[in-house]
Amino acid sequence: MKSKCFLGAFMGGWIILGLCLSAGAVQFSEKNKPLNAVKPAARKKTSTTSTQPRQSLSKNPIKSLPAFGIEKIWLDRQNIIHFTLKNRGKGTLSAAQHAKGKVRVSVGNVSKTFDFKTVDPAQLLRKPGKTLSFNTHLAVTQAVRVKVKIFFPGRKPEISLKSNPLTITERYT
């Protein structure tokens, strides 16, 4: 008994389709041969108590990254700008990333960029928790806004930018 039917209707923007198949059309077997039931795959028996140590979920553990911040900016008695940087993160900075690092000091509308090689020649900031002070040799002659920002070309910006950059308005004496 092979019967197939196809119904289709269009009613007010809706398309209604129907498909009818008889039992003979649904069977998917050779003619006059019954379908055989398939046995489910056997499950592996596992012990509930294991003597082996658990494996870690990740083969590559998440690395802690360095997070840099500007601790403070100040003027000395000769009105020269100084700043203090700190690696606040738990991770270390690679030598290649240290070589790419830059610090931009903006004084009013003028800015000067220093390489990390100049700011940190001993590479102290590569280690977590280390602090470094730097003399920019930039003199201030009037009340002006000073901004210091750390950046690494080609590296994702830090999540929290509250510590980077730091801006102050300094008065010269």
Image: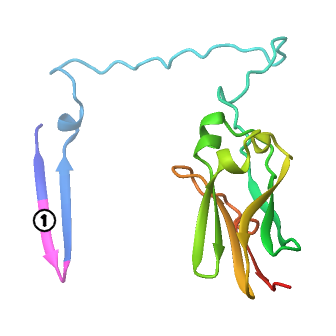
* In-front residue for pair 71/30: 71
In the rendered image, the quadrant that contains the N terminus is top left
Magenta stretch holds residue 12? yes
Q: Quadrant of residue 163?
A: bottom right
State the residue at coordinates (84%, 73%): 78
State the residue at coordinates (67%, 48%): 118
Most extreme residue toward the right, as rendered? 77
Q: Residues within 10 Å of mark 1 (few under 14, many from 20)?
A: few
Q: Quadrant of residue 34?
A: top left
Q: Position of residue 115 (x, y in %)?
A: 62, 51
Q: Position of residue 12 (x, y in %)?
A: 18, 83
What colour scheme governs how the chains and residues are painted in the rendered image of this protein?
rainbow
State the residue at coordinates (19%, 43%): 22
Q: Is residue 110 left or right of residue 94?
A: left
Overall secondary structure of the magenta stretch? strand
Residue bearing the label numbered 1: 8
In the rendered image, the quadrant that contains the C terminus is bottom right
Range of residues picked out in magenta: 7-13
| Relative vertical location of residue 104 with respect to residue 55 in this rendering, above or below | below
| Relative vertical location of residue 43 with respect to residue 133 in this rendering, above or below | above
Question: Which kind of residue does numbered mark 1 sit on?
Answer: Gly
Magenta stretch holds residue 108? no
Q: Position of residue 38 (x, y in %)?
A: 41, 19
State the residue at coordinates (72%, 42%): 121
| Relative vertical location of residue 131 with respect to residue 23 in this rendering, above or below | below
Q: Secondary structure at mark 1?
A: strand
Q: Is residue 62 left or right of residue 171?
A: left
* In-front residue for pair 132/166: 132
* In-front residue for pair 20/54: 54
Q: Is residue 17 left or right of residue 38?
A: left
* In-front residue for pair 74/88: 74
